[in-house]
Image (spheres, grey):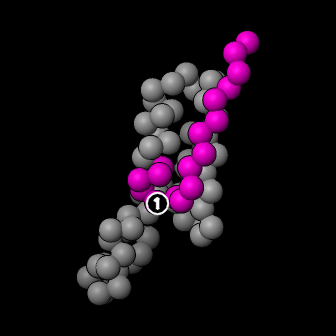
Amino acid sequence: MSARTRMVVVGGDAAGMSAATQARKRRDADDLEIVAFERGGHTSYSACGLPYYAGDVVKDWRTLVARTPEQFAEQR
């Protein structure tokens, strides 16, 4: 059995989660462990959309969240 590779993602915005998703697609799922650190409660949010929320163009901040932490956990 070969050693598992660990990928560490710091920050749960869309860029970090996209990188993790692409790594998972490119490697054997059993060979890659992904650990993501986010100090807030949300992952895969659109950081570039925050000014629109602050400017009241986007009314509901939840529309900026692509996937919840639970959805990522389901995909390992």
Q: Position of residue 8 (x, y in %)?
A: 60, 45
Residue 55's place in the image compared with 17, above or below, is below
SS label for mark 1:
loop
What range of the chain is rendered magenta?
Answer: 1-17
The C terminus - image quarter? top right
**Mark 1 crowd level (few <14, some 14–19, many ≥20, 10 Å Cα):** some
Q: Residue at x 71, y 21 (%)?
A: 3
Q: Residue at x 47, y 40 (%)?
A: 21
Work out whether residue 60 or residue 54 is closer to the camera in this orientation and state it: 54
The answer to which quarter of the image holds residue 30 is top right
The answer to which quarter of the image holds residue 42 is bottom right
**Residue 42 visible in the displayed image:** yes
Q: Type of residue at label 1?
A: Asp
Left or right: where 6 falls relative to 64: right
Q: How many labels, in total?
A: 1
| Residue under numbered circle 1 | 13
Q: Position of residue 55 (x, y in %)?
A: 29, 87
Instruction: Specify whether residue 22 is painted magenta.
Output: no
* Residue at the outermost top position: 1
Work out whether residue 36 or residue 44 is closer to the camera in this orientation and state it: 36
* Residue at the outermost left position: 57
Residue 37's place in the image compared with 3, above or below, is below
Left or right: where 21 falls relative to 28: left
Q: Position of residue 40 (x, y in %)?
A: 60, 69
**Residue 69 visible in the displayed image:** no
Left or right: where 18 falls relative to 33: left
